[in-house]
Image (spheres, helix red, strand yellow):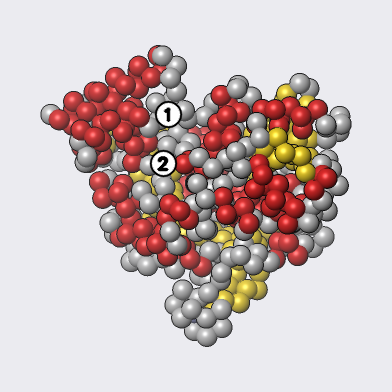
Amino acid sequence: MIFLLSLWLSKLLSIIISACKLGQASNFPGKVALLITNDFLTHFKFNKEIKIILITGTNGKSTTCGLLCNILKSAGCKVITNKAGANLLSGISSTLSFHSDIFGNIEEKYLVLEVDEATLPLITKFIKVNFIAVTNLFRDQLDRFGELDTTAKLIEKGINNCSNATVILNADDSRVAFLKANNKKIYYGINRVIPEGSPLNDKIWLNDPQENTVCPECKSELVFTTKLMAHLGNYKCKQCNFKRPEPDFAVSGFKADDLIINFDISSNSFSQSKNNFFLPMIGLFNLYNALCSIAIAKTILNVTSVQIQKGFQSYSTIFGRGEKIIIKDKTAWLFLIKNPTGTTEILKTLSTVPNARFLIAINDDFADGRDVSWLWDARFDILSNHKKDIYVSGKRAEDMALRLKYANIHQDKIHIQENIVAGMNKSLKSLDSSEILYILPTYTALLELQRKGICKAAPKD
Ligand SMILES: [Zn+2]
């Protein structure tokens, strides 16, 4: 009975929040329900055939989740998912409460949730899940999670709660591939070396010194035959037998330009060897996200290549992760930045765009992580040959300017404007007609632009 009361209250709150346009009700209703019933999630009654899929990891959760949902939808499935960023217990509780009937019954057959790493064990304690995918493990918000080992242990605990779940792991990430679990494992990875003559074939892509790459078994150094980004690649240990597992789903070749990525997948699950997918997104990190979404979709349901491709094409980017906006006849793109690796990957990709200009907006509110020392681990030196002025904005604009100075960018080229909207207007004004502004904001800086109506709606509560 208490469950039903908290469910109804949570449903009522979402109606009020939506009716009064107070936000997307993606967290608050669930938060209230959990205050009343702390095992709220255990009481939902799922469709007997339901497949529950959780996606966790440092980077790429939202994008992978979005791509997977679109693939499933293009295969005619009805899917429930959580809104971008609502990946804590409260967000997931809100999602289930919203989609259930008034007795807590959920009829849909697919539940796809992006889950924060630390929240994974909490969810799997309450819900029996069928699949858990782990995208990667990077340093992210150290002030929240502590060291990477702690994060890996949380994920292991989450997986161990569900011994029957199949886990889908990134073989190219040594920390993910060797998470300790007795579950059935499916691996995905990129087999191809970096294409000759491609802008990706640059020293920058081969060496990210800030990521440690030691053997999880014996702590010796790992050697790489291919390194694609940060510590991801084909590795083996110098001392023991530890090596990258053979992927069940492997990208066998890819070509990337500044708008799309073309790629092939080799897997026993596909009858043809050349499937020629194209992804309307940029960056190698998105190739990993697409690959992960394919590995999950193929594992849970035998989707066809055509359905996968349709899913990719219908995918509109998740809030702030590569969103195009037109302001005063000028073009700008928004890319959320939040940790060193993600930021470095975005910089690598954008540095190959000929007419790129930059506005970097750094806040240090709770949702951004209070500690901005991660700026020193991101490879801003990639911009050191950038010819044009760079604008910095946000509460920590000064820190950002200092970071750029140490990345060998002359201080005359760095413009500081703490107010983000003013920073954006100034940088737009300085563009000539052929140039594109790339805005790289942290989460709350992005929210500020959203509140001013400059970009797409974001979760507000
Ligand atoms: Zn070893």
The residue at 52%/29% (across/down) is: 458
Residue 203 visible in rendering: yes
In the image, is 1 to the left or to the right of 305? left
Amino acid type of the residue tagged 2 in the rendering: Asn
Considering the image in quadrants, where does the C terminus appear?
Answer: top left
Give how far across and how far down residue 77 sits, in percent: 43, 34
Q: CA distance from mark 1 to mark 2?
A: 13 Å
The residue at 15%/30% (across/down) is: 2
Considering the image in quadrants, where does the N terminus appear?
Answer: top left
Depicted 57 relative to depicted 31: above or below: below
The residue that label 1 is drawn on is: 461
Give how far across and how far down residue 197 sits, in percent: 82, 60
The residue that label 2 is drawn on is: 87
In the image, is 264 to the left or to the right of 365? right
Give how far across and how far down residue 91 sits, in percent: 37, 36
Q: Secondary structure at mark 2?
A: loop
Asked if the residue at label 2 sits under 8 Å from ligand 1, the reply is: no
Which residue is nearer to you in this view: 394 or 82? 394
The quarter holding residue 314 reads top right
Tag 1 and tag 2, C-beta contact below 8 Å: no
Depicted 229 relative to depicted 259: above or below: below
The residue at 70%/66% (across/down) is: 206
Q: Earlier in the sequence, mark 1 or mark 2?
A: 2
Amino acid type of the residue tagged 1 in the rendering: Asp
Q: Residue furthest bottom?
A: 239
Q: Secondary structure at mark 1?
A: loop
Badge 1: residue crowd in 10 Å (few <14, some 14–19, many ≥20) = few
